[in-house]
Amino acid sequence: MQITFIGAAQTVTGSAHLFETEDVKFLLDSGLYQGKRKHAFELNRQFDLFDPKEIDFIILSHAHIDHSGNIPTLVKKGFRGHIFTTFATRDLARIMLEDSAHLQEHDVEYVNKRRIAQGKKPFEPLYRVEDARQAFLQFVGVNYHHKFQVNENIAFTFYDAGHILGSAITLLEINEKGKKILIGFTGDLGRPNRPILRDPEKIPDVDILIGESTYGNRLHDKHEDVTEKFSEVIKKAIARKSKIIIPAFSVGRTQELVYDLHKMFDAGLAPRIPVYVDSPLAVNATEIFRLHPECFDAETSDYILRDEDPFGFNQLTYVRDKEVSKSLNKKDGPMIIISASGMCEGGRVVHHLANNIENPRNIIMIVGYCAEHTLCRKITDGEKYVNILGENYQVNAEVVVFHSFSGHADRDEMLAYYDNFDRSRIQKLFLVHGEHEAQIAFKESLENKGFRNIEIPKRGYSFTF
């Protein structure tokens, strides 16, 4: 058996890991790499390490685009196997992959107008809506805790990762040459004691562990402290009639923000101001949340049993229409606009930033991880000038960064989860889905906990077991 690390290797995005046994080739995840536009554009198109036609199936950890977003490209290039995932992920991936295709078509059309005027060759989108729809026909839903036998030598079981709705930690069982190998893949590991979703579940001990390391060198703020800071931001916005622009992923982060705002307003912790969720995808995703109560923790389940509205449909405005979205830029504050994408690399939030980032009264609130070279990272790092849709803008708006809203476990939360494993059994521990600096720090923390044989693979690195 051989494992080759295709993506999320010494970087955060583009999760994809290739397994080759005597019988089959399959992938754990097939996500989009997000970073420098030109580099990302090229990297997501090239398949120099495998032929999509030769992949027999995919096991998908969750629906976020950096884990699922390149599946339609594989389909476009001839992949015809099943895509195994949880039922909630299947439903979310359907709308997210179509939305990804729409955004690519729209963004390429927008950029091509300028390129054609300059006499340059127009771009082609990575894939189109029809490719995303074809991909959805290949999805197969599998319940948590149900051992699924792919063939006589390969089986897997999903456990709840607590990261977003439907996210899964995968336990793989591979029989080869008379030996059974157990492999764990955390996907994106969620956080304990967070709203809406259940805590990450322990899986059995394994021989090989492939684990995330995104916040391997950082700790999150306590959630109660952030609630207080968030209420102060709202009060500041009221005093100076600000717009609070919050870039947020449509799935997971948006629902958690809405849930927290609902509780803050109801408890009187902050004055109520208009809140707009400006993302058709977030609207659709929130409706899918309602269809999957099997993923909720006890608190959220109790809310729903009492017929309360944890996602605030009666207390805020969900925006689908493009013209309504544009009209928000003409309205006066105070108001909150929650809009995708979280990395600020596409979607409606890009236009809200372009229209509001130069106004010193406004506030940009960063509530999640921003990958290297993305617009979100540039704003977070305090750059004074940023490029948005080909134009330069001065960052005059106040920038506020809250890490507590992250759906990723921080260093201590990851260490607590990894601490459950039998160190003597693990023959290899691969750290993926993290920037190299964070991975080196986390490797040292794990070694201090007694873990050995830890590797930080580069893209293209292969390991034969």
Image: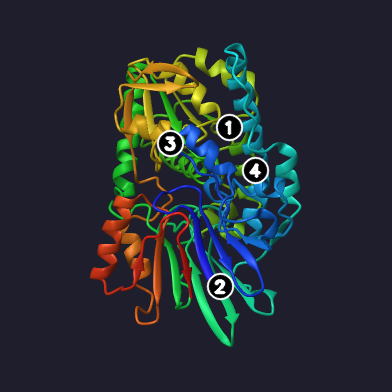
Looking at marks 4 and 2 on the same chain, the residue that comes earlier in the sequence is marked by 4
Identify which amino acid the numbered label 3 is placed on. Answer: Phe
Q: Judge by depth and name the residue closer to the eye, 403 or 271.
A: 403
Looking at marks 1 and 2 on the same chain, the residue that comes earlier in the sequence is marked by 2
Question: SS at mark 2?
Answer: strand
Identify which amino acid the numbered label 1 is placed on. Answer: Ser
Question: SS at mark 1?
Answer: loop
Residue 294's spot in the image, x, y percent? Answer: 60, 61
Residue 275 is at least partly visible in this image: no
* CB under 8 Å between discs 1 and 2: no
Q: List the residue tagged with mark 3.
A: 265
Looking at marks 3 and 4 on the same chain, the residue that comes earlier in the sequence is marked by 4
Alpha-carbon span between mark 1 and mark 4? 14 Å
Alpha-carbon span between mark 3 and mark 4? 33 Å
Q: List the residue tagged with mark 4.
A: 97
Q: List the residue tagged with mark 2.
A: 172
Q: Quadrant of residue 26?
A: bottom right
